[in-house]
Image (spheres, helix red, strand yellow):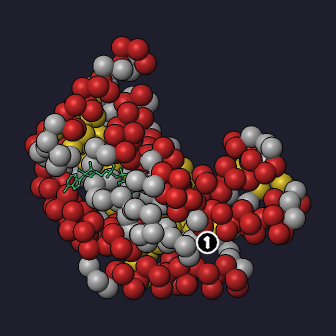
Amino acid sequence: MDKITVVGAGNVGATAAQRVAEKELARQVVLIDIAEGVPQGKGLDQFQSAPIEGFDSRVIGTNGYEESAGSGIYIVTAGIARKPGMSRDDLLTTNAGIVRQVSENIARVSPDAIIIMVSNPLDVMSYVAMKASGFTRERVIGMAGVLDTARYRAFLAMELDVSVEDIQAMVLGGHGDTMVPLISYTTVSGIPVTQLMDRAKLDAIVDRTRNGGAEIVKFLKTGSAYYAPSAGAVQMAEAIVKDKKRILPCAAWLQGEYGMRDLFLGVPVKLGRNGMEGIIEVELTDDERAALQKSADAVLEPMALV
Ligand code: APR
């Protein structure tokens, strides 16, 4: 790809830009932020790591959108991060305003781009971006499920003392306390996890996953997680750039899938060069279906406010 732009040069955005460059997913990586000097400084610093790391993606930082014109993908991380005690929904109004303005600029300079939304509250910000950009649902995708699933997989690997690579799992629903880790689809190299762990341990891990973001915020005190969130966004970008047709849990605009419509919710999505190329409807137990509905309700309520 010619150009990938990351909007927001804070913790998540800058780390994402560095990961995109190190993987050489685009010839040029553009870092945009409103803070004067910050994207320029970080972009230059990152490109100075290129001779050492051995990548040829040119990283530049800017305060405007013109330099990003023609980007194939925008990873949007602009906004304010969650502080201790703050729920994701507390961020709603401020971040909605920011994401609206960012999305209008993206549509203006890169009308064919794909937006990977990262700013929280994720599901609602994805909706704001789709509305403000006027893009089709194929080209606005939210990064949440990849992160929540990574947290779940990491906790399972720690508990079972096995490779993270051998844990397959899927966390659906909204990016919040109502997310839905699917135990019935959790396997270790194909072995149902329920054969390897008792239910009480599994429930504790599910619970820890649901509070995975808050656990980090409590440690950091002045910010929220960024290594895993940036890795999640870049995995999605890679699937698109390489047209890999990966099946990853992402926030997608539902149009009847799972019996729901007109909201962003985490579901298994096929990612390829056209962005969201399909939604896979998996069979759910009655409990999982009820949990997904509860999750949808938690997304619909704040959505009405933007
Ligand atoms: N345009 C561009 N950048 C903006 C704008 C804007 N209108 N408004 C704010 N920013 C920038 C800030 O200047 C800051 O550099 O967004 C950046 C956000 O960075 P951090 O505060 O470090 O937050 P970060 O931890 O990166 O999280 C960003 O991702 O995971 C989510 O919940 C998180 O919504 C938050 C987002």
Whether residue 290 sits left or right of residue 187 in the image: it is: left
| Quadrant of residue 69 within the rendered picture | top left
Residue 170, placed above or below residue 44: below
Residue 279, placed above or below residue 16: below
Local crowd size for mark 1, using a 10 Å CA cut-off: few (<14), some (14–19), many (≥20): many
Whether residue 280 sits left or right of residue 168 in the image: it is: left
Q: Residue at x 39, y 62 (%)?
A: 82
Q: Residue at x 33, y 69 (%)?
A: 91
The residue lying toward the viewer, choosing from 51 and 134, is 51
Q: Residue at x 55, y 84 (%)?
A: 294
Q: Residue at x 28, y 54 (%)?
A: 78
Residue 60, placed above or below residue 301: above
Number of numbered discs: 1
The residue lying toward the viewer, choosing from 239 and 178, is 178
| Quadrant of residue 215 within the rendered picture | bottom right
**Residue 32 seen in render:** yes
Q: Secondary structure at mark 1?
A: strand
Residue 181 placed where, x, y %?
A: 65, 67
Residue 299 placed where, x, y %?
A: 43, 79
Residue that lies at the very extreme toward the top in this rendered image: 51
Residue 234 placed where, x, y %?
A: 44, 43
The residue lying toward the viewer, choosing from 281 and 300, is 300
Task: Identify residue for label 1.
Answer: 180
Residue 78, placed above or below residue 92: above
